[in-house]
Image (spheres, coloured by chain):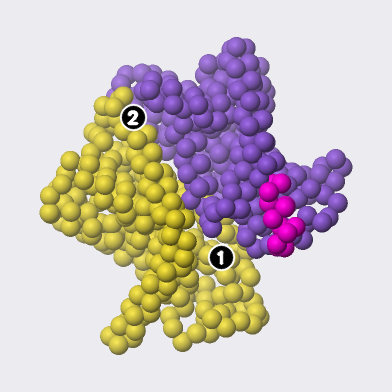
C-alpha cells in the first residue's frame, strides 16, 4: 500500500509543479463559467425566471470539476499498450494497473482541489450565494470527488480498450460527450424530455454525474443515498470490466511480448 | 513563386493520400471513428435543440441560427484537424528539439509542421457540418456558397489562433496544455449563441478572443450578405493571420536548437 501512496504523492507534486498547465486549466474554467453565466442570464431575462444562473452555474462548476480534472489516463494507458512500454512494468513487484491508476488519482486530485477553490470564488463573485446550505458543501464536495475517482476509473477502462482498437481518441471523446449529454454535465437533465431521462438512467453517467451534482440544488438524504448506492453499483461493474480486460492484456503481453 | 506553390500543392496532396491510406489500413476502425465523431457532434446539437425547444429563443437566436453556427464551426474544425493539426504539436517539437528536423528541410517548415498530424475521425465533422446546414432552414445556393467561404475563413482564424498559442512555447517551456486550454476556450466561446454577449463582452468576443469571427459574422452573412460584416470579418482574420506568421518567425529567430540529430 505504501508504494501506491508514494506514487500518489509523487504524481500529486508533479501535477502541482506544472504551473503553466494549471493556469491554462483555470483560465478555461473561468471562460466556461463566464460564458454559461452570460447564457443563463440571457435566458433568465427572456423567460423572467430570476436566479436561474445562480442554480445552474454552481451546478456547472461541480460538473466541470469532475470533467476537467480527468487526467487523460485513457491516452497514457493506450500509449503504454501500443508502444509496448507496459511489458517493462508487468514483471516489477507492483501492479501496473494500480500504478497508473494511483498516478492518475494524484494528478486528478490537484486539478480537482485547485478548480474547487478558484471556481467557488469566481462563481460566488458572479452569481452570489450558492443554492445549497454551507454545511452541505463538504458533503457535496466529497460526493463529487468520489465521482471524479469513478470517472478516472471509467477512462482507465477506455484506455484498456486499446487492446482491441487502433485508436481510442474518438472513443474517449464519445465518452466525454455522452457524459455531457447523458450525465447532464452542462445542462441538468431536469430540462431534457422525460423519454431522454429514462434512457440516461440506464447509463453510468446518470449516477456519477447527474445524481452527485444534483445535490447542489436538490440536497436531501434520500438523494444522497440514491447517488451513493447507484455509484457503488457502477463501480462494481466498471471494475469487473477493468479486471477482466487487464487479465487478458497481461496474458497477451506474457505470450507475445510488448 | 507559382512553381514553388504548385510543388507544395503536390506535396500536400501526396501527404493527404498517405493519411487516408494509413487510416484505411484498418477500415472498420476508421469508419467507426468517423461515425462516433458524427454521433458526438449530433449529441451536442441535440443538447442545444433541447434548450431552444424549452426556452424558445435566446436574445433573438433560434435553433436555425445555432445550426448555421454548427455548420461553419464543424467544417472549419474538420479542415483544421484533417489538414493542419500538426500545428498543435509545435510546443512538443520545440520542447524536445524535434523542430530541428523540420527546419533543416528545403520545404517550408510551417507547412511541414502543419501537415505532420491528421485525425481521420474528423471527416465526421464535415458530415455534421453539412447536415446542420441543411437542417438550418436557410438553404439556398447563395447561402451555401457563403457558408463554404465562411467555413474557410473560420479555418484560417482557428489556424492562426492556434499558431499564436503554439508559439508561446518559444517563450514558456512545457506550454502544450496551456495552449490547448486557451484554444479550447476559443472553441467554447465560438460555439455559443453570439447574441448572449452584449456591451463590453461583445468587444472582447470580437477582438482578444476572436470567437465572434466564427459565430457572429458568419451567421449574419449566411442569413443576409452585407459588405460591412464581410469586410470586418476578412480584415479581422487577415490581422490574426499576419500576426501569427510574424510571431512564428520571431520565435524561430529566438529558438535555440535542441541539438537533436534526425532526418525527415
Most prominent secondary structure in the magenta stretch? Answer: helix
- Quadrant of residue A50 within the rendered picture: top left
The residue wearing badge 2 is B50
Chain B is shown in which shade?
yellow
Q: Which mark is residue B45?
A: none
Q: Are discs 1 and 2 both within one chain?
A: yes
The residue at the point 67 percent across, 23 percent down is A138
The residue wearing badge 1 is B91
Tell me if mark 2 has few (under 14), some (14-19) or many (20+) residues whose alpha carbon lies within 10 angstroms of its own.
some
Task: Tell me, by letter, which chain the rendering colours purple.
Answer: A
The residue at the point 70 percent across, 62 percent down is A256
Q: Is residue A248 magenta?
A: yes
Q: Is residue A20 magenta?
A: no
Q: Secondary structure at mark 2?
A: helix
**Which quadrant of the rendered structure holds the C terminus of chain B?**
bottom right
Say whether residue B197 is visible: no
Label 2: chain letter: B
The residue range painted magenta reads: A246-258
The residue at the point 31 percent across, 42 percent down is B194
Tell me: residue A246, above or below residue A129: below
* Residue B235 falls left or right of residue A198: left
Say whether residue A81 is visible: yes
* Residue B10 falls left or right of residue A148: left
**Which quadrant of the rendered structure holds the N terminus of chain B?**
bottom left
Q: Earlier in the sequence, mark 1 or mark 2?
A: 2
Callout count: 2
Amino acid at each position: 500500500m505504501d508504494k501506491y501512496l508514494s506514487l500518489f504523492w509523487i504524481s500529486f507534486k508533479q501535477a502541482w509543479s506544472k504551473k503553466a498547465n494549471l493556469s491554462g486549466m483555470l483560465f478555461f474554467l473561468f471562460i466556461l463559467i463566464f460564458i454559461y453565466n452570460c447564457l443563463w442570464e440571457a435566458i433568465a431575462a427572456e423567460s423572467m425566471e430570476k436566479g436561474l444562473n445562480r442554480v445552474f452555474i454552481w451546478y456547472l462548476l461541480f460538473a466541470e470539476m469532475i470533467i476537467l480534472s480527468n487526467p487523460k489516463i485513457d491516452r497514457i494507458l493506450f500509449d503504454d499498450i501500443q508502444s509496448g512500454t507496459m511489458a517493462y512494468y508487468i514483471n516489477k513487484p507492483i501492479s501496473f494497473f494500480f500504478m497508473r491508476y494511483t498516478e492518475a488519482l494524484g494528478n486528478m486530485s490537484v486539478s480537482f482541489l485547485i478548480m474547487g477553490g478558484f471556481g467557488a470564488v469566481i462563481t460566488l463573485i458572479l452569481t452570489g450565494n450558492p443554492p445549497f446550505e454551507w454545511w452541505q458543501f463538504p458533503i457535496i464536495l466529497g460526493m463529487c470527488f468520489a465521482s471524479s475517482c469513478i470517472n478516472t476509473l471509467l477512462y482507465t477502462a477506455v484506455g484498456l480498450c486499446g487492446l482491441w482498437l487502433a485508436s481510442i481518441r474518438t472513443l474517449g471523446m464519445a465518452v466525454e460527450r455522452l457524459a455531457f449529454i447523458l450525465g447532464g454535465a452542462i445542462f441538468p437533465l431536469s430540462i431534457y424530455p422525460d423519454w431522454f431521462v429514462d434512457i440516461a438512467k440506464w447509463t453510468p453517467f446518470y449516477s456519477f454525474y447527474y445524481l452527485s451534482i444534483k445535490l447542489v440544488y436538490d440536497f436531501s438524504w434520500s438523494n444522497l443515498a440514491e447517488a451513493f448506492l447507484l455509484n457503488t453499483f457502477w463501480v462494481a461493474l466498471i471494475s469487473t470490466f477493468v479486471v477482466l480486460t487487464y487479465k487478458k492484456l497481461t496474458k497477451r503481453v506474457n505470450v507475445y511480448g510488448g | 513563386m507559382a512553381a514553388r506553390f504548385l510543388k507544395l500543392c503536390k506535396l500536400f496532396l501526396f501527404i493527404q493520400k498517405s493519411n487516408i491510406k494509413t487510416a484505411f489500413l484498418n477500415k472498420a476502425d476508421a469508419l467507426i471513428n468517423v461515425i462516433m465523431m458524427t454521433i458526438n457532434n449530433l449529441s451536442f446539437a441535440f443538447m442545444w435543440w433541447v434548450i431552444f425547444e424549452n426556452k424558445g429563443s435566446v436574445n433573438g437566436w433560434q435553433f436555425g441560427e445555432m445550426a448555421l453556427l454548427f455548420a461553419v464551426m464543424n467544417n472549419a474544425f474538420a479542415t483544421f484537424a484533417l489538414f493542419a493539426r500538426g500545428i498543435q504539436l509545435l510546443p512538443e517539437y520545440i520542447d524536445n528539439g524535434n523542430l530541428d528536423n523540420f527546419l533543416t528541410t528545403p520545404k517550408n517548415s510551417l507547412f511541414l509542421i502543419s501537415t505532420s498530424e491528421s485525425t481521420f475521425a474528423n471527416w465526421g465533422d464535415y458530415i455534421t457540418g453539412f447536415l446542420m446546414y441543411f437542417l438550418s432552414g436557410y438553404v439556398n445556393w447563395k447561402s451555401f456558397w457563403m457558408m463554404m467561404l465562411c467555413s474557410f475563413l473560420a479555418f484560417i482564424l482557428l489556424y492562426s489562433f492556434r499558431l499564436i498559442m503554439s508559439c508561446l512555447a518559444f517563450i514558456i517551456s512545457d506550454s502544450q496544455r496551456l495552449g490547448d486550454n486557451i484554444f479550447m476556450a476559443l472553441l467554447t466561446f465560438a460555439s455559443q449563441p453570439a447574441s448572449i454577449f452584449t456591451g463590453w463582452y461583445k468587444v472582447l468576443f470580437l477582438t482578444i478572443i476572436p470567437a465572434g469571427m466564427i459565430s457572429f459574422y458568419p451567421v449574419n452573412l449566411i442569413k443576409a450578405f452585407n459588405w460591412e460584416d464581410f469586410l470586418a470579418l476578412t480584415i479581422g482574420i487577415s490581422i490574426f493571420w499576419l500576426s501569427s506568421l510574424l510571431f512564428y518567425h520571431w520565435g524561430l529567430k529566438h529558438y535555440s536548437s535542441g541539438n537533436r540529430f534526425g532526418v525527415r
